[in-house]
Amino acid sequence: AQSVTQLGSHVSVSEGALVLLRCNYSSSVPPYLFWYVQYPNQGLQLLLKYTTGATLVKGINGFEAEFKKSETSFHLTKPSAHMSDAAEYFCAVTPNTGFQKLVFGTGTRLLVSP
Amino acid sequence: NAGVTQTPKFRVLKTGQSMTLLCAQDMNHEYMYWYRQDPGMGLRLIHYSVGEGTTAKGEVPDGYNVSRLKKQNFLLGLESAAPSQTSVYFCASSPGRNQPQHFGDGTRLSIL
């Protein structure tokens, strides 16, 4: 069975600082991994995804994530935070074989201060 | 392009009442999903559909029913609403299995 752990329900950074949101997964088979962002009163939007191939994945709004199989991690980073990045971020995993439900982490709320 | 549209956006029900949430997608996606989102619990899958005329149970199906009579629509029904069903409900769709899902803006449901 798959599971996702997001360390830290809240992360606070200053505008211009590095953003690092942590995600560790558990999967018995090679996974597909996703990061979604949710702005207030909206649905989830896909930031980026890892399926196969290059382990460093670039997404929208300057975010990127690196798949590290040895560490079972898929941490999300952005070199310089912007006020508009304040939102909730969800990591999700699904196996790459057969149909399995997408399993979400519990989310990390990113707070950006001026 | 509307994507995934959910109606209504807000609703308040009394315990025991029934209602139906409607999800419509215009992307010709095969797969559709219903989730509920509760504080500190992420999103939990209620039911899903892998094509017109099919439905399957997710992680938390009790107290809900679904129907997918048309490819573009996925309905979620609450048979007898309970306060524990107070939540934000999200519909999503995807073109195929294990593909990125596209989400609607949610329905905020309160059961008194």
Image (cartoon, rainbow, N blue to C red):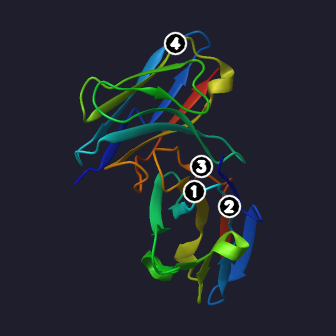
- Report the chain holding disc 4: B
Q: Are marks 2 and 4 on the same chain?
A: no
Whether residue B90 is situated above or below residue A86 in the rendered picture: above
Distance, label 3 to label 1, CA atoms, is 5 Å
Mark nearer the N terminus (3 vs 1):
1
Whether residue B11 is situated above or below residue A36 in the rendered picture: above
Q: Which image quarter is the N terminus of chain B in?
A: bottom left
Residue B26: which quarter of the image? top left
Distance, label 4 to label 1, CA atoms, is 31 Å
* Residue underneath mark 4: B79
Mark 4, mark 1: which one is toward the viewer?
1
Indicate the position of residue B8 as horizontal and vertical percent values. 40, 32
Amino acid beneath label 4? Glu
Amino acid beneath label 1? Val
Q: Secondary structure at mark 2?
A: strand
> Residue B4 versus residue A74: which sits nearer the camera?
A74
Whether residue A81 is situated above or below residue B83 in the rendered picture: below
Q: Secondary structure at mark 3?
A: strand
Indicate the position of residue B42 as horizontal and vertical percent values. 64, 48
Mark 3, mark 4: which one is toward the viewer?
3
Q: Secondary structure at mark 4?
A: loop
Indicate the position of residue B76 as horizontal and vertical percent values. 44, 25
Distance, label 3 to label 4, CA atoms, is 26 Å
Q: Are marks 3 and 2 on the same chain?
A: yes
* Residue underneath mark 1: A93
| Left or right relative to A48: residue A112 | right
